[in-house]
Image: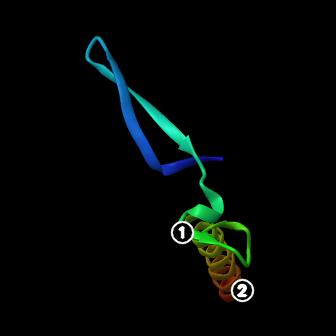
């Protein structure tokens, strides 16, 4: 997995920078969650998706006659 938090510009071609993403540091990273074995950023995204689905279920349930 490439980490979106660890990237840098490596070289410049013309007027465009080339961005390089580093590999996930896993256990060495402060954002790594041992209990789920994933990055806390990804865990947060999954939880927000779950909340979105539950809210949509609630809205759909309210619209039924």
Which type of secondary structure does the marked residue at label 2 adopt? helix
Q: Nearer the viewer, mark 1 or mark 2?
A: 1
| Residue 57 in the image, given as x and y percentages of width and height | 71, 80
Q: Residue at x 47, y 33 (%)?
A: 20
61 up-or-down from 45: above or below: below
14 or 35, which is in the foreground?
A: 35
Find the distance from the CA under tag 1 to the CA under tag 2. Answer: 37 Å
Give the quarter of the image for residue 41. bottom right
Question: What colouring does the structure picture have?
Answer: rainbow
Give the quarter of the image for residue 60. bottom right
Q: Relative to residue 61, is residue 14 drawn left or right?
A: left
Which quadrant of the figure contains the C terminus?
A: bottom right
Q: How many discs appear?
A: 2
Q: Residue furthest left?
A: 15
Residue bearing the label numbered 1: 31
**Pointers 1 and 2 in contact (CB under 8 A)?**
no
Q: Residue furthest front?
A: 28
Circle 1 residues within 10 Å: few <14, some 14–19, many ≥20: some
Give the quarter of the image for residue 64. bottom right
Residue bearing the label numbered 2: 61
Circle 2 residues within 10 Å: few <14, some 14–19, many ≥20: few
Q: Residue at x 66, y 88 (%)?
A: 62
Q: Which mark is residue 40?
A: none
């Amino acid at each position: 997995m490439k980490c979106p938090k660890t990237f840098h510009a490596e070289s410049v071609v013309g007027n465009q920078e080339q961005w390089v993403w580093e590999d996930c540091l896993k256990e060495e990273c402060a954002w790594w969650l041992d209990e789920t074995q994933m990055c806390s950023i990804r865990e947060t995204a999954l939880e927000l998706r779950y909340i979105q689905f539950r809210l949509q279920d609630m809205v759909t349930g309210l619209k039924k006659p």
